[in-house]
């Protein structure tokens, strides 16, 4: 075994390797989306959005959660976006947000009964989508993905709008002035 790897593994096992944010407060949720979107505090004056400016933001979500039974991490990123900006002086009402769902992430758009029937377990993202929608976030599901997986409009959470395709939504949102968060 490589000596550097052995030293690192020994350090981890003995607790000598500290996380990068060892002196920082742990992340916490809120104030906009409670229980989702944990964020760290940053120094006052950090580069930020401009208070009082209206922003239109979209996010593309195509991959499933990294952990079974957990809310979709990419969708939860939008809860982080709302929480961190509210903590840093940005009025959540100044943020118009749309999330475009396609591919493996489509299961996050299913209502609880449909998710249980189709996937065989409860939808771990349902409460997250409901919380975000309650703060004005819009959700669009790619109709091509839905058809591929056999999902119907009746299978979707009421907060989700069926679209012709994810590409269609992105083109339309861009023409309406939305900025795509590229990850």
Image (tube, rainbow, N blue to C red):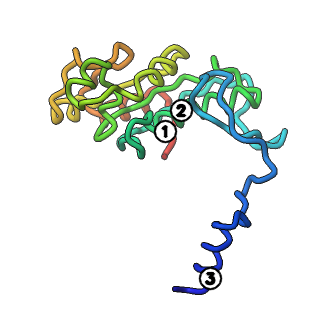
Percent x, y for residue 175?
A: 42, 30
The residue carrying pointer 2 sits among few (fewer than 14), some (14 to 19) or many (20 or more) residues within 10 Å by Cα, namely: many
Closer to the observer: label 2 or label 1? 2
Mark found first going from the N terminus, 2 or 3: 3
**Distance CA(mark 2)–CA(mark 3):** 38 Å
Q: Give SS at disc 2.
A: helix
Mark found first going from the N terminus, 1 or 3: 3
Quarter holding residue 63:
top left
Q: What residue would you read off at disc 3?
A: 4
Percent x, y for residue 117?
A: 21, 24
| Side (left or right) of 36 relative to 160 | right
* The residue positioned farthest toward the right in the image shown: 44
The residue carrying pointer 1 sits among few (fewer than 14), some (14 to 19) or many (20 or more) residues within 10 Å by Cα, namely: some
Badges 2 and 3: C-beta atoms under 8 Å apart?
no
**Distance CA(mark 1)–CA(mark 3):** 41 Å
Closer to the observer: label 1 or label 3? 3
């Amino acid at each position: 075994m490589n000596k550097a790897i052995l030293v690192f593994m020994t350090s981890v096992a003995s607790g000598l390797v500290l996380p990068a944010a060892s002196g920082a407060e742990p992340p916490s949720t809120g104030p906009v989306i409670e229980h989702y979107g944990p964020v760290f505090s940053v120094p006052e004056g950090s580069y930020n959005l401009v208070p009082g400016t209206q922003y239109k933001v979209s996010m593309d979500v195509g991959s499933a959660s990294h952990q079974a039974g957990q809310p979709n991490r990419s969708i939860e990123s939008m809860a982080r976006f709302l929480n961190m900006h509210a903590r840093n002086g940005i009025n959540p009402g100044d943020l118009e947000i749309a999330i475009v769902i396609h591919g493996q992430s489509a299961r996050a758009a299913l209502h609880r009964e449909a998710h249980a029937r189709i996937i065989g377990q409860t939808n771990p993202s349902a409460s997250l989508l409901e919380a975000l929608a309650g703060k004005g976030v819009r959700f669009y599901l790619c109709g091509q993905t839905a058809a591929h997986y056999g999902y119907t409009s009746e299978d979707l959470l009421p907060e989700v709008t069926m679209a012709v395709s994810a590409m269609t939504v992105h083109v339309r949102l861009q023409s309406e002035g939305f900025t795509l968060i590229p990850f």
